[in-house]
């Protein structure tokens, strides 16, 4: 309850609505929290990696995709910001690798195929390699991000398909 001797109260802002008659008025201010938006994608098969080169991972399945951030038929490596959804995002990825010769590997998230926005180095302990990388980043409409893996040597390292690998998300 608001008690005032004022004859005029000005509420300014989008979504402000005053209703009622006589001495009783209701002020409604829209907002509070934005709806969740984002995608989490994965590949349900092993992916062969190129030795001594970046491999951009592709994704053939979606855990969720609220607004068509991902396509399983074209540009399957990308999570693309839909029109009207630009803003700050948490972007992340995780991968498990088969063992190699013990040389370092790294993972990275790239923006629009050009700019690295997060990088993590992974060392092989001889029996298992796993990595995750994440960042918070401002993305504009139509920006896209991709997850890349670099394997130092030419051995036959491959992504191990599991419930956590490879996974890629933004929200």
Image (cartoon, rainbow, N blue to C red):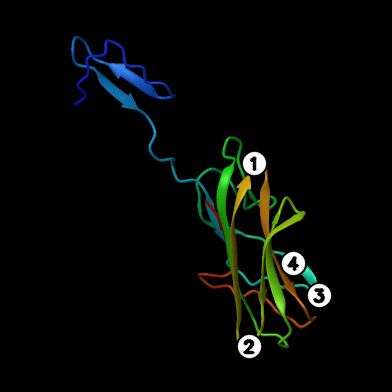
Question: Mark 1 against mark 3, which lies toward the viewer?
Answer: 1
**Res. 52 mark:** 3
Residue 140's disc is 1
Q: Looking at the image, tell me whether mark 4 or mark 2 is earlier in sequence order.
A: 4
Residue for badge 4: 55
Q: Contact, CB < 8 Å: mark 1 with mark 4?
A: no
Q: CA distance from mark 2 to mark 1?
A: 39 Å
The residue to which callout 2 is attached is: 125
Q: Nearer the viewer's eye, disc 2 or disc 3?
A: 2
Q: Residue at x 52, y 49 (%)?
A: 38
Q: Position of residue 51 (x, y in %)?
A: 79, 76
Indicate the position of residue 1 as horizontal and vertical percent values.
19, 26
Image: 18 above or below 89: above
CB within 8 Å, label 2 to label 1: no
Image point (40%, 24%), residue name: 15
Residue at the spot 69% in from the left edge and 50% down from the top edge: 74
Q: CA distance from mark 1 to mark 4?
A: 25 Å
Using a 10 Å C-alpha cutoff, classify the residue at mark 4 as few (fewer than 14 neighbours), some (14 to 19) or many (20 or more): some
Of residues 133 and 99, the one nearer the viewer is: 133
């Amino acid at each position: 309850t608001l008690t005032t001797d004022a004859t005029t109260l000005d509420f300014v802002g989008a979504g402000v609505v005053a209703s009622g008659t006589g001495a009783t008025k209701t002020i409604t201010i829209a907002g509070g929290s934005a709806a969740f938006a984002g995608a989490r994608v994965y590949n349900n098969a092993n992916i062969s990696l190129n030795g001594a080169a970046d491999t951009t991972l592709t994704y053939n399945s979606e855990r969720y995709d609220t607004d068509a951030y991902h396509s399983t038929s074209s540009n399957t490596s990308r999570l693309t910001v839909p029109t009207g959804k630009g803003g700050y995002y948490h972007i992340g990825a995780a991968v498990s690798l088969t063992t190699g010769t013990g040389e370092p590997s790294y993972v990275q998230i790239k923006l629009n195929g050009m700019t690295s926005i997060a990088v993590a180095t992974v060392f092989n302990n001889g029996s298992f390699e796993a990595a995750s990388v994440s960042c918070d980043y401002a993305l504009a409409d139509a920006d896209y991000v991709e997850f890349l893996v670099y394997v130092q040597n030419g051995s036959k390292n491959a992504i191990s398909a599991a419930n956590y690998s490879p996974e890629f998300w933004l929200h």
